[in-house]
Image (cartoon, coloured by chain):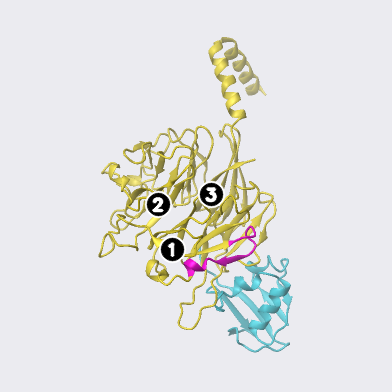
Chain colours: A cyan, B yellow
């Protein structure tokens, strides 16, 4: 499925804004992306399996958690909060 | 061109009149400079890392960077064992923290495959997540590849492969007293931290750590077990002002040539401890009363265990954490804390409200020793003569978190 990647994570994707990955859930998708882009998942999900505070994941423009089921036709966005100064 | 000719003419004229003794002085200075180590500064900031390279006389500095532009860099450290491996503790504002490694002095960086991370919490346990690595400490000389990472919330990690894979030091991270010793919540403005990891150069199993809002602790079995080391250290914010633990050290240092000597700058004063004693002596009592002994960093002379520098800061009322009365100054002791002298020549005389973070204060190994500090306003100052005078060597950098002086091969 098609995944939009926030700019802060594009050092992992060779600066590509969109990548493709697969998985039955958001968690599965992130694990698949981590195989293609090693280290990327830990920047998004902490060691307690929580999406990091300033990250949001949307599936078909709806806020999703790691357990959210996915279909191949879904559109996923990994976004970073506008925060800090 | 005209200006260059005038200068050449002037130099020629001066040379003609120079007495033989001055020519000799110049030759001696040139010989001394030829034997001086090459010094560089690793400057970590809120928006990236910068490296400053000095000429032999440390009179000119070239700024190189930024590395990791826009990201929070808490610490960059060179491995003194191979003098070429750099580790950097990095986190962007939104993403999780990681460690980068370079073996070509920052030309290229590779990310750790397994950055410091807590194990998954068991049921009923606090589910901790590493906020950031605060300090990177090379391990013992006999253990190439071993480094320690002190993180927030206060915990200790170790790598044995030069920073590629990190694992927790379970003796600390799983210690039954750990959450009594150091509260995991954010207590300090940038979060609770373990900030000082010290390795005894005589014994790789002998470690000290210090934590804000926790105290100082010692291990003699390479981190498998720990005990508090806070006797006679004040905690004036605590119902019991001299508890076994819970003190607030800001920075702890061990002298490499006299490893039984420890110094600490604490929330409640400046202390020295000469092991095997366990009772700290408050050497800040000999600071001028109008200055007090509050600060964050403490810097040791690399060759003289009796010499240390502090940067006193305002700890009154709401703790402004700025230079006292807007008049920045270092204080130096040359007698292990029995007396202190003010050093402020070249620093602003008034309205300079510097904040110098605990890792943004350091010394090099040259002769005479260079002393450096960076401010949260992005100014970098140095003294080429052990604090007798200062000059600014960089300005307009981002908020400075750490300054490390390194000797290059």
Which of the image's four quarters has the C terminus of chain B?
Answer: top right
Which of the image's four quarters has the N terminus of chain B?
Answer: top right
Mark 3 vs mark 1: tell me if same chain: yes
In the rendered structure, the answer to whether residue B36 lies left or right of residue B386 reads right
On the image, which quarter does residue A56 sit in?
A: bottom right
From the image, tell me which residue sits under label 3. Answer: B397
What chain does mark 3 sit on?
B
In the rendered structure, the answer to whether residue B10 lies left or right of residue B325 reads right
Q: Which residue sits at x=56%, y=34%?
A: B58
Magenta residues span: B159-173
Q: Is residue A83 above or below residue B11?
A: below
From the image, tell me which residue sits under label 2. Answer: B296
Q: Secondary structure at mark 1?
A: loop
Q: Secondary structure at mark 2?
A: loop
Q: Nearer the viewer, mark 3 or mark 2?
A: 2
Q: Position of residue B236 (x, y in %)?
A: 27, 59
Q: Which residue sits at x=56%, y=54%?
A: B139
Check whether the beta carbons of the residues at disc 3 and disc 1 lie within 8 A of each other. no
What chain does mark 1 sit on?
B
Q: Residues within 10 Å of mark 1 (few under 14, many from 20)?
A: many
Q: Earlier in the sequence, mark 3 or mark 1?
A: 1
From the image, tell me which residue sits under label 1. Answer: B226
Q: Secondary structure at mark 3?
A: loop
Comparing B174 with B98, the one in front is B174
Mark 3 vs mark 2: tell me if same chain: yes
Residue B172 part of the magenta-drawn span: yes
Check whether the beta carbons of the residues at disc 3 and disc 2 lie within 8 A of each other. no
In the rendered structure, the answer to whether residue B266 lies left or right of residue B113 reads left
């Amino acid at each position: 499925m098609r995944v939009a990647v926030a700019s802060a994570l594009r050092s992992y994707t060779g600066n590509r804004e969109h990548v493709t990955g697969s998985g039955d859930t958001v968690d599965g998708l992130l694990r698949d992306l981590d195989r293609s882009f090693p280290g990327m998942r830990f920047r998004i999900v902490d060691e307690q399996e929580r999406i990091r505070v300033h990250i949001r994941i949307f599936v078909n423009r709806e806020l999703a958690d790691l357990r959210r089921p996915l279909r191949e036709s879904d559109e996923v966005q990994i976004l970073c909060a506008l925060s800090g100064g | 061109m005209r200006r260059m000719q005038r200068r050449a003419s002037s130099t020629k004229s001066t040379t003609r009149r120079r007495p033989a003794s001055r020519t000799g002085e110049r030759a001696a200075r040139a010989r001394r400079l030829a034997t001086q180590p090459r010094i560089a500064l690793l400057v970590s900031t809120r928006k990236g890392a910068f490296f400053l390279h000095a000429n032999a006389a440390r009179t000119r500095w070239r700024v190189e960077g930024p590395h990791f532009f826009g990201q929070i860099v808490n610490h960059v450290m060179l491995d003194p064992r191979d003098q070429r491996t750099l580790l950097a503790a990095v986190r962007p504002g939104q993403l999780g923290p990681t460690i980068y490694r370079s073996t070509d002095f920052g030309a290229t960086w590779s990310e750790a495959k397994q950055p410091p991370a807590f194990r998954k919490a068991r049921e009923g346990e606090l589910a901790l997540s590493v906020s950031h690595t605060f300090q990177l400490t090379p391990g013992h000389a006999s253990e190439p590849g071993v480094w320690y990472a002190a993180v927030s919330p206060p915990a200790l990690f170790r790598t044995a492969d030069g920073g590629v894979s990190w694992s927790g030091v379970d003796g600390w991270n799983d210690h039954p007293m750990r959450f009594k010793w150091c509260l995991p919540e954010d207590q300090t403005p940038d979060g609770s931290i373990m900030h000082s990891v010290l390795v005894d150069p005589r014994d790789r199993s002998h470690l000290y750590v210090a934590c804000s809002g926790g105290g100082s602790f010692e291990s003699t079995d390479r981190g498998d077990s720990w005990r508090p080391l806070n006797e006679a250290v004040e905690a004036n914010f605590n119902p019991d002002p001299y508890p076994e633990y819970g003190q607030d050290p800001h920075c702890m240092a061990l002298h490499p040539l006299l490893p039984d000597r420890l110094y600490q700058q604490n929330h409640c004063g400046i202390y020295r401890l000469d092991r095997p004693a366990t009772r700290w002596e408050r050497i800040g009592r000999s600071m001028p009363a109008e200055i007090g002994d509050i600060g964050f960093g403490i810097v040791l002379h690399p060759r003289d265990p009796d010499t240390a520098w502090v940067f006193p800061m305002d700890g009154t009322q709401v703790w402004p954490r700025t230079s006292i009365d807007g008049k920045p100054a270092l204080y130096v002791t040359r007698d292990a804390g029995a007396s202190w002298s003010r050093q402020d020549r070249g620093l602003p005389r008034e309205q300079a409200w510097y904040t110098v973070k605990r890792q943004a204060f350091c010394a090099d190994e040259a002769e005479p020793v260079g002393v450096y500090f960076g401010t949260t306003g992005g100014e970098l100052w140095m003294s080429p003569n052990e604090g007798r005078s200062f000059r600014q060597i960089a300005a307009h950098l981002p908020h400075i978190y750490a300054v490390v002086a390194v000797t290059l091969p």
